Amino acid sequence: MIDLLGFSLCLLSFNCFALAKYNHFKDVFKKRPTESQRKKLLLAAWISILLSLVLCLVTQDGYGALLFCGFMSLSVLIIMVFYNFLVDYVKWFSVLNSVLVVLSGLFLALN
Amino acid sequence: MQAHPLNAQPTKLRVIELLSQFFKLSPIFSYRFSVFLRFLIAIVGGYSFTAASTALLSFLLPLTKSDAVLLCVSLSILIYALVFIYAFYIKSLKTVWISILLTTSAQICLLAVLKGWL
Amino acid sequence: MKDSFFRSMTWLHTWVGLLVCWLLYLIFFAGTLSFFRDEITLWNQPAIHNVQAQTQRIEAQKQQIITGFDYLANHGANSSSWRITLPEPRIPYLIYGYAKPKEPGQRRSKFENTQLNPNTMQELEPFVDTKGGNFFYRLHYDLHYMDAITARWIVCFASFFMLIAIISGVVIHKRIFKDMFSFRRNKGSRTWLDTHNLSSVLALPFHLMITYTGMITLIFMLFPYPAKVTYDNGMRGFFNDVTPRNTMTDKAKGELPMVPIQRILDQVYTKWPHADITRVQVNQPNMAASTITVLVSAGKTLRDQAPRLIFSGATGQMVAKTDDELTSSKALYESLNSMHTGRLATWLLRWLYVLGGIAGCVMIGSGCIMWAKRIRERTKNNVKPSFGLKLVEGLNLATIMGLPLATCAFFIANRLLSPTTAERADKEILAFFLTWLAVALLALIKRDTLQWRVMAAINAVACLSVPVINALTTNGNIVSYLMHKQWALFTFDALFLLFSILFFIQTEKLRTAKSNSKTISPSQSNNLKRQKP
């Protein structure tokens, strides 16, 4: 479960990074992002990637750094596929991503 | 590319200059030759530089023997890569050759003095 | 030669990369497969397919060792060395082995091994002679048909060039981080560039780590100088210093019976109550100088040298052990090594490693294809392509399509060769290299879209035939593996089916692609260079 939280946070972060780009934002929402939207997205991206890194490092020591790099690779791959081949599903995918973060976080918090 | 024995020039520098003048006669050949020289110094020179510096470092580091050796070998590839990039970064081939040869021999000399090989 | 740092780095990236890319592709390919070393060995060895994983693996270890000592005392009393290899999560069976007398000309004596099913303690059916995953593991750094040391130097040279290519690549493509999520489809060499960029950025930390640490694993061959300078007796002195050895009783002469193994195991479990013992080795059993070495799994720690305790067999006293806490230099060196081998990886991390490995193969493959395509585009129609271009194109086809096919041939040979064939393991490897040679010969004749299509079709058929032949020649098949939850075998077959489909898609894409016989089709998708585990 801790792996899932780390991964979904990483995925969320790259999702935000991609949305913060003009062209990708336009592809998804059919309009240009405002400057403040971009800033918020970037902020969210950095926060969640740092959280993911800290989570991996704190819970798994040196092993966690390797895991984190792997998570980054997988996230970029998934994001790339969605933003280039499945643009219509990006909204659903983002919702699912956020739900994953919340669920795995809740699960960990409750246990 | 070391000094040609028949070329009784006082310094190696002059030899390189003369050689490069000679090779300027055919531009393609001179280009290929300079590429070859650059790779030679990057690979062989970089290797000797790394070997000398890691050996010296492992000898100087105030750690236990095994720790010093392990630290130095772990860093060696990093040093090698940096020297390699440096050999391609500097525009003047002459500077590259001189700097790498000089630093390598200086380190070997220092090591030889410290170890009492001389 | 160069006008600026930027241009010199571009130049360096192109030529350094091109020079070694095919060798690197082989190294990455074999290395990626090596992450599944145990699983491949399992698949290649039908005798252990039905060994169930133990439910109480660690708890059963003590009894297995005690039984093993009884067995070895009965069978190998005069042997010079005993070895008990316990089941691990990925290796389901138990081995009791003792050294046979050394024959003249042998450097190490061979072991007489008995493989047991740990659940029933019954001997397993005889094993077939196969190298299994070890073949790819050795291919990864020893290559084949050549002296191992020469091969290692070549591999190190290629890896070093890879490191240089990665560093210069990051410098020249500063934009790769900016457009990291963009991928332009059907744009000819632009698509290849995007594939190249994406696969490198995607796993950049992995690429850097694996290349650097790869050279670290062979570092004492590359740079023995620090050890030679620091220690009076050179490398030997260094290795003696860092490996725990018995210095207390090794001079003892004569025979002495060994203490009961329980006394030694009690000491191990006192020190490590939850020890997951992987191996017990006995040197010179029943001699006064005998030692018993107990190795335990390092678990998820970044350590390559397995933690171990060494006991004197005659007195039962502990004579040496690995450090419990590593000093920072040792920790650095050990973690670099263990990161490369990935022995610590659980299944999640192992698959992430494989993802990185595949990204590496795609990166290298797309890089060399891109080079050939660019030169092709620049060459005028009426100009004959240069020898260099033809060579590059030929090598591209031979390596990128040949290696997956050769891998299929290796596995098919494993199933089709009769178990009694003499030197069977070598024949499997021969099948691998002969297939590769055949593809290379084909690439020698012609290298245009048609050849790529034919190779893709053959690869698709070959990948499909691996699980089919497996189903026909062994008791299990992909469905029964799923039913009996034999995940390793199931994944193996499923991946071959997946790659068969990918190669089939590639064949279709190449058919519909514009039949521009001059260029390798642009739209052949990047699945081209994916490979099987």
Image (cartoon, helix red, strand yellow):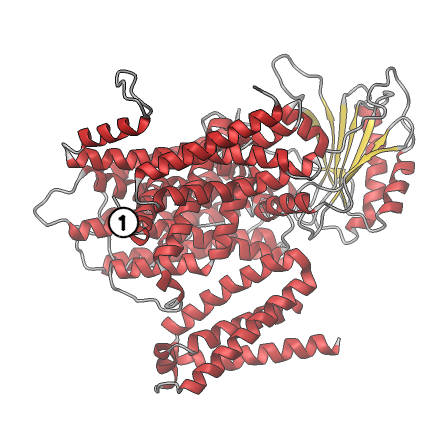
Which residue is tagged 1?
Answer: C371
Relative horizontal placement of residue C446, taking residue C418 as reference (left or right): left
Relative horizontal placement of residue C159, taking residue B7 as reference (left or right): right
Relative horizontal placement of residue A59, taking residue A38 as reference (left or right): right
Q: Position of residue C25 (x, y in %)?
A: 40, 44
Q: What element carries label 1?
A: helix
Q: Is residue A102 above or below residue C32?
A: below
Three-letter residue code for mark 1: Trp
Q: Residue at x 80, y 48 (%)?
A: C275
Residue positioned most to the left: C382
Q: Residue at x 62, y 30 (%)?
A: C227
Foreground of the two, A104 or C161:
C161
Q: Which residue is drawn at 43% across and 74% down?
A: A18
Q: Callout 1: residue from which chain?
A: C
Q: Position of residue C301 (x, y in %)?
A: 69, 51
Foreground of the two, C366 or C80:
C366
Quarter of the image containing the N terminus of chain B?
A: top left
Q: Position of residue C497 (x, y in %)?
A: 45, 55
Q: Is residue C491 above or below residue B16?
A: below
Please indicate, yes or no, whether residue C402 appears anywhere in the rendered image. Answer: no
Q: Is residue C359 above or below residue C308?
A: below
Quarter of the image containing the C terminus of chain B?
A: top right
